[in-house]
Image (spheres, grey):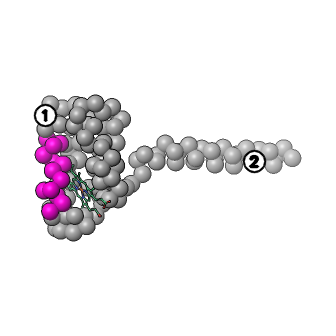
Amino acid sequence: MRVRLIVGSVILAVVSGSGVMAFNNSPYAAKSVKEVMKIAHKDGLLKKIQGGSASDEEKKQLLDLYVDMLEGEPKKGDKAEYLAKTNALVVSAVKVVLGKEGALDELKKTSDCMACHSKHK
Ligand code: HEC
């Protein structure tokens, strides 16, 4: 009886522990380029950051999304060119998180929709 109770609570601890972990990690789970476009560009995260009203957490979220984009697959076009573009995008997002001078101007250039879409979308 006692043993069963202990085993039961260990299982419970493991299950709830992993539940909490999954919950904590979920905002940072890898996203496809399509999902990144939706969250960062369609739903307005980038705009909010450009407008200067985003929280530190939102800036980090954009960085996280752009890292997924860097590791993701472009729909078409040269992979090396795509990597160069997304690399610049990640670097500018890092600068935004760090609050570096000129970071928003740089982000504006690296997030140029048409420059990337014309080759990779
Ligand atoms: C560095 C490259 C890059 C930049 C910059 C970029 N995109 Fe995209 N975007 C893509 C790629 C690649 C796709 C195609 C994704 C797919 O279908 O797999 C895409 C697709 C999209 C889609 C369609 C998503 C869907 O559900 O099919 C939207 C909307 C979009 N982008 C909006 C934007 C906007 C707005 C900007 C500028 C603020 C932007 N993107 C900047 C690469 C980029």
Q: In the displayed structure, does residue 12 sit left or right of residue 97?
A: right
Q: Relative to residue 46, is residue 30 depicted above or below? A: below
Decide: few, some or many residues near mark 2? Use Cα within 10 Å; few <14, some 14-19, many ≥20: few
Residue stretch rendered in magenta on the structure: 106-118
- Residue, x 12% and y 46% (percent of image)? 109
In terms of sequence position, does the residue under pointer 2 or pointer 1 come before the other?
Answer: 2
Residue 35 on image: x %, y %: 35, 56
Q: Is residue 59 magenta?
A: no
Along the viewing direction, whichever of 8 and 92 lies nearer the viewer: 92
Tell me the quarter of the image containing the C terminus: bottom left
Residue 8 is marked as 2
Residue 53 on image: x %, y %: 28, 30
Residue 116 on image: x %, y %: 16, 58
Q: Are marks 2 and 1 in contact (CB under 8 Å)?
A: no
Q: Main secondary structure of the magenta part?
A: helix
- Find the distance from the CA under tag 2 to the CA under tag 1: 56 Å
- Residue, x 84% and y 44% (percent of image)? 2
Residue of label 1: 102
